[in-house]
Amino acid sequence: MAVERTLSIIKPDATERNLTGKINSYIEAAGLRIIAQKRIRLTRDQAEAFYGVHKERSFFGELVDFMVSGPVVVQLLEGENGIAAYREVMGATNPANADAGTIRKDFAIDVQNNSVHGSDAPETAAVEASFFFSEIEIVG
Ligand code: RTP
Ligand code: MG
């Protein structure tokens, strides 16, 4: 196993309900370290670019509307097998299918308002990290 970094976003449904600290406690309990973090408001261009891989999907417009609807907290996480470790504690995309004890099971509202994003592979993690953070913002 290798130490990996992964990009996390605490989504608008969660910041709206003041859940940042609770979600961070799940992240840290999973053995991941928050090595960079900031609260921002995504522009429509940024949200469209970030989720560009989904632009042909039926839910793309709604997804972008949701991601710009309020503040988000973007974070860089680091830990052993970090990408998979975070996906595991996030739980399934649809909270109805998420395992007990996961962030989405405990906090998500529905398949769209699902509280967190996590990178899905080393290549996307690197691209997503540099989308939001410069080297001087990261203290590993
Ligand atoms: P994410 O990229 O945010 O970490 O989520 P994911 O990998 O678990 O799911 P993905 O398939 O990449 O979908 C990205 C986000 O789009 C919204 N979504 N809405 N209405 C729908 O059927 C639907 N499906 C997905 C969710 O916010 C999902 O996390
Ligand atoms: Mg995804």
Image (cartoon, helix red, strand yellow):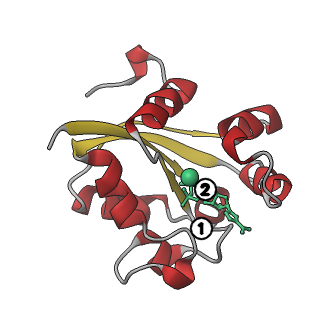
Could you tell me how far apart the alpha carbons at marks 1 and 2 are, in whole angstroms?
8 Å
Quarter in which the N terminus is drawn = top left
Residue 91 sits in quarter: bottom left
Residue 46 percent across, percent down from the top left: 73, 33
Horizontal side, residue 34 vs residue 38: left or right: left
Q: Which residue is mark 2?
A: 11
Residue at coordinates 65% horizontally, 63% vertically from top-left? Answer: 16
Residue at coordinates 78% horizontally, 55% vertically from top-left? Answer: 57
Horizontal side, residue 115 vs residue 76: left or right: right
Residue 42 percent across, percent down from the top left: 71, 39
Q: Which residue is mark 1?
A: 114
> On residue 37, which mark appears?
none
Quarter in which the C terminus is drawn = top left
- Do callouts 1 and 2 mark residues in contact (Cβ within 8 Å)? yes
Whether ligand 1 has any atom under 8 Å from the Cβ at mark 1 is answered as: yes
Residue kind at label 2, given as amino acid type: Lys
In this view of the protein, which residue sits in the foreground, 111 or 132?
Answer: 111
